[in-house]
């Protein structure tokens, strides 16, 4: 048992040390590749499809503020206030799950960023535990501006499309800096399931969701992004 405990302790020390180092590194270094990008490429290869991976890193000041406002309005309107977790939404999600209602998303932008950069998609308590761990780390070691910058650069926004610059060019033929409020809202409408919803070919549901997000963008306070 002592031998086993020694192995566990060494593993924990290595894991914690390496994970903290990775988070510190990404405070300064762009994230060019994520686990999900690799997983999707493997899935495409296994399905005998051409590998599609569209991604270009941009600093936050080169991304339209409409996109920031849209994702905060649609995904996490308390982003600037919480410390990584929206416990009210988590409680509501648990209650709805127990009552048999359709599962609702309760992940904050910080949690989604932690998952996108360090983990993989899917459920399970183990992965959710790791997600919570990395969420705490990035909230401690990154600014909100850095979290938003990495989120908008790494999130899946379509089939083989990652980040706002890639989707802006692929679906709107423009740079991310030029996205209008309605275009940003349409992109944000796809985020619950970007492989199902397509901002280049929006359904009636997506148009309705776009209008809702635009309305929310007008109602919430402007998101002030300062130094990273």
Image (cartoon, grey):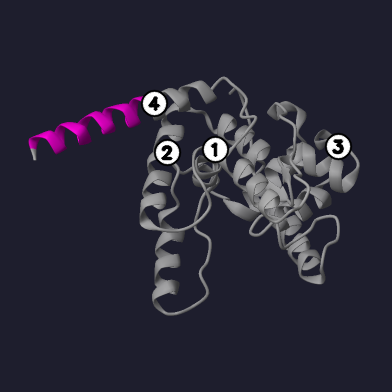
Q: Disc 4 marks which residue?
A: 18
Q: Residue at x 46, y 27 (%)?
A: 23
Q: Which residue is mark 2?
A: 134
Quarter of the rendering containing residue 57: top right
221 lies above or below 137: below
Q: CA distance from mark 2 to mark 4?
A: 12 Å
> Which of pointers 2 and 3 indicates the residue nearer the eye?
2
On screen, 101 above or below 94? below
Residue sitting at x 58%, y 50%? 77
Pointer 4 with pointer 3, Cβ within 8 A = no
The crowd level at tag 2 (other Cα within 10 Å; few <14, some 14-19, many 20+) is: many
Q: Secondary structure at mark 3?
A: helix
Question: Depth check: 163 or 217 in front?
Answer: 163
Tell whether 209 sits left or right of 155. right
Residue at 70% of width from left, 26% of height from top? 59
User: In the structure shown, which secondary structural element does the residue marked by tag 4 occupy?
Assistant: helix
Q: Which residues are the magenta region? A: 2-17
The stretch drawn in magenta includes residue 70: no
Q: Position of residue 223 (x, y in %)?
A: 64, 39
How far apart are the two marked residues, 4 and 3, measured between alpha carbons? 38 Å
- With respect to residue 25, does 225 lie above or below? below
How many numbered discs sit on the rendered protein?
A: 4
SS at badge 1? helix
Which of marks 3 and 4 precedes in the sequence?
4
Q: Nearer the viewer, mark 3 or mark 1?
A: 1
Q: Position of residue 46 (x, y in %)?
A: 66, 53
Q: Which residue is mark 3?
A: 178
Q: Position of residue 218 (x, y in %)?
A: 73, 52
According to the picture, the residue beneath numbered tag 1 turns out to be 117
Residue 12: say if magenta.
Answer: yes
């Amino acid at each position: 048992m002592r031998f086993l405990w020694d192995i566990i302790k060494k593993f924990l020390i290595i894991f914690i040390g390496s994970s903290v180092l990775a988070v510190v590194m990404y405070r300064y270094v762009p994230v060019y590749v994520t686990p999900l990008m690799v997983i999707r490429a493997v899935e495409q290869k296994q399905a005998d499809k051409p590998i599609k991976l569209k991604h270009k890193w941009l600093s936050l000041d080169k991304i339209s503020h409409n996109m920031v406002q849209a994702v905060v309005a649609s995904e996490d309107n308390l982003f600037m206030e919480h410390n990584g977790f929206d416990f009210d939404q988590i409680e509501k999600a648990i209650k709805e799950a127990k009552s048999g209602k359709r599962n609702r998303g309760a992940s904050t932008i910080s949690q989604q960023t932690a998952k996108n950069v360090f983990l993989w998609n899917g459920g399970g308590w183990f992965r959710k535990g790791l997600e919570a761990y990395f969420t705490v780390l990035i909230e401690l070691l990154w600014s909100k501006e850095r979290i938003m910058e990495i989120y908008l650069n790494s999130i899946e926004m379509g089939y083989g499309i990652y980040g706002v610059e890639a989707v802006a060019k692929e679906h709107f033929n423009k740079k991310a800096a030029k996205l209008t409020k309605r275009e940003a809202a349409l992109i944000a409408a796809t985020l619950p399931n970007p492989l199902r919803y397509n901002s280049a070919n929006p359904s009636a549901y997506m148009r309705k969701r776009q209008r809702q997000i635009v309305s929310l963008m007008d109602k919430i306070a402007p998101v002030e992004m300062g130094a990273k």
